[in-house]
Image (cartoon, rainbow, N blue to C red):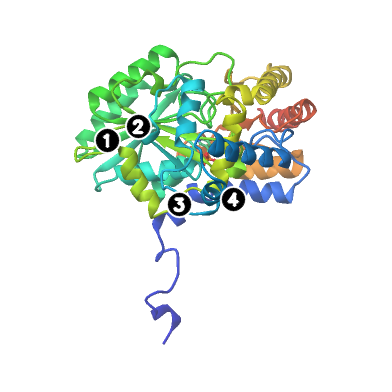
């Protein structure tokens, strides 16, 4: 028998369609280039600052969490040991601590029952999209450009993403209403809209307070949920209330991540889903059912580390990240200043001016594709992210994303100067 006759012959045609989608492999090129050009200055990776990483902290956090179990929950030594070693509750063992953190940092009133602790925010996105995709009419709206993790979760849950225009101030609410109408006209059903109101990835843009209130009204009027991703919310000077803090009608499903505020290696995130389900219980209970068959439970050891960090910082990650936030703010302002110095007089070269977070969008009067990125790495020793990766290859071809989170002032000066050499060399 020819191998091609085998029913289970593997090819891109016989595996899930998401595997052939460019969005899923878009970050591979970046990782390859980082490996190939280790001396290139990376203004590409959205990773948190590393200088304060310390293995000793992991031990302190674990110990603080165990002390909490003994002291506040009256667990015996055997019970403490079992909590860390054994399988745990699907919803997690630190939901109460997460709820206290949300009250402290975000003024969000979340009951521990509405919280599911997940393997990063990524799992939370997957669970919510899986639950909301009841049939092939169901779609998710999301601003274009959008975070690749969301695109990936949508792809693997077979959820079509219906793009909404994005402006300097976040999602365009007029276009959102227009797209909601088009979804209906097409016989589809909009279930939810994904948004990052604070310092979005990849654009760095934020929504002002009136826009947040209006978004909540639009969502409630159209009967859709808002999936609020707040991964960068702490890292700004003037902080506005999250959608969830303003929500009094259970319109918002809050997607939380400890990757930037706790530690990315722990892989702990969560979802607050307090929406009631007609047959009883909350959306969180349904998500927990799905999680039981996906990751069973989030590692109790990882949860204990994050729980300990919360306990040792009086539940405030704002406080725990004071040094990091100061560095991100310094880096952001320094990068914006260097861009003005090096490129301020160049016609057609512009950038936005986010007030927090990790990212800046630069617009140039020529095509920014993966070929240009390779050229930048090889001939100029600098890396950025071409914006088209966040549009699923359907836009953003004259924009790039700069990330400021991992750099020192010296690297920012040198990185922007290398980028400026690349850009000015391409100007007419
Ligand atoms: C918009 C956004 N959401 C969430 C995350 C973090 O996800 P996770 O908690 O799975 O690391 C990131 C990290 O890059 C992000 O940019």
State if disc 2 and disc 3 touch (CB < 8 Å).
no
> Which residue is denoted by mark 1 in the rendering?
190
> Which residue is denoted by mark 2 in the rendering?
193
Q: In this view of the protein, which residue sits in the foreground, 65 or 266?
A: 65
Between the residue at mark 4 and the residue at mark 3, the CA separation in whole angstroms equals 13 Å
Between the residue at mark 1 and the residue at mark 4, the CA separation in whole angstroms equals 31 Å
State if disc 1 and disc 2 touch (CB < 8 Å).
yes
> Which residue is denoted by mark 4 in the rendering?
28
Identify the mark nearer the N-term, 1 or 4. Answer: 4
- Which quadrant: the C terminus? top right
Q: Say which of marks 3 and 2 sits in front.
A: 2
Q: Position of residue 402 (x, y in %)?
A: 63, 31
Give the structural element (helix, strand or loop) at label 3.
Answer: loop
Q: Is 11 placed above or below 160 here?
A: below
Identify the mark nearer the N-term, 3 or 2. Answer: 3
Between the residue at mark 3 and the residue at mark 1, the CA separation in whole angstroms equals 23 Å
Q: In this view of the protein, which residue sits in the foreground, 259 or 281?
A: 281
Identify the mark nearer the N-term, 4 or 3. Answer: 3
Between the residue at mark 2 and the residue at mark 4, the CA separation in whole angstroms equals 27 Å
Identify the mark nearer the N-term, 3 or 1. Answer: 3
Give the structural element (helix, strand or loop) at label 1.
Answer: strand
Q: Position of residue 281 (x, y in %)?
A: 26, 38
State if disc 4 and disc 1 touch (CB < 8 Å).
no
**Residue found at x 46% / y 56%:** 19
State if disc 4 and disc 2 touch (CB < 8 Å).
no
Q: In this view of the protein, which residue sits in the foreground, 371 or 412?
A: 412
- Looking at the rendered structure, which numbered label has been put on residue 21? 3
């Amino acid at each position: 028998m020819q191998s091609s006759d085998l029913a289970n012959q593997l090819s891109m045609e016989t595996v899930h369609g998401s595997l052939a989608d460019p969005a899923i492999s878009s970050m591979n090129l970046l990782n390859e280039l980082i490996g190939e050009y280790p001396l290139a200055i990376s203004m590409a990776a959205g990773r948190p600052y590393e200088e304060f990483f310390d293995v000793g902290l992991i031990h302190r956090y674990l110990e603080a969490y165990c002390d909490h179990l003994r002291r506040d929950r009256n667990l015996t030594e055997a019970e403490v040991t079992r909590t860390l070693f054994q399988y745990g509750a699907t919803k997690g063992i630190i939901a109460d601590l997460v709820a206290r953190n949300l009250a402290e940092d975000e003024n969000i009133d979340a009951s521990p029952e509405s919280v599911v602790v997940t393997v990063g925010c990524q799992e939370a996105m997957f669970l919510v999209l899986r639950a909301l995709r009841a049939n092939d009419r169901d779609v998710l709206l999301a601003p274009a450009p959008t975070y690749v993790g969301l695109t990936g979760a949508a792809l693997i849950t077979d959820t079509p993403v219906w793009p909404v225009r994005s402006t300097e101030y976040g999602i365009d609410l007029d276009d959102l209403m227009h797209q909601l109408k088009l979804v209906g006209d097409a016989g589809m059903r909009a279930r939810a809209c994904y948004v990052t109101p604070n310092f979005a990835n990849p654009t760095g843009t934020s929504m002002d307070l009136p826009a947040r209130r209006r978004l909540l009204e639009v969502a409630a009027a159209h009967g859709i949920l808002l999936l609020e991703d707040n991964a960068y919310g702490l890292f700004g000077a003037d902080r506005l209330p999250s959608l969830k803090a303003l929500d009094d009608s259970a319109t918002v499903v809050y997607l939380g991540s400890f990757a930037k505020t706790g530690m990315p290696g722990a892989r702990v995130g969560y979802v607050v889903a307090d929406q009631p389900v007609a047959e009883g219980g909350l959306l969180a209970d349904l998500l927990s059912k799905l999680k039981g068959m996906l990751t069973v439970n989030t590692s109790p050891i990882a949860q204990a580390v994050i729980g300990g960090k919360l306990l040792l910082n009086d539940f405030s990650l704002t406080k725990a990240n004071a040094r990091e936030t100061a560095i991100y703010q310094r880096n952001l302002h320094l990068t914006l200043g260097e861009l003005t110095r090096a490129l301020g007089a160049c016609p057609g070269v512009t950038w936005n001016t986010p007030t927090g977070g990790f990212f800046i969008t630069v617009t140039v009067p020529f095509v920014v594709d993966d070929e240009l990125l390779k050229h930048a790495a090889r001939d100029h020793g600098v890396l950025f992210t071409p914006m088209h990766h966040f549009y699923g290859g359907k836009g953003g071809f004259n924009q790039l994303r700069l990330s400021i989170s991992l750099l020192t002032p010296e690297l920012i000066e040198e990185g922007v100067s290398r980028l400026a050499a690349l850009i000015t060399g391409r100007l007419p």
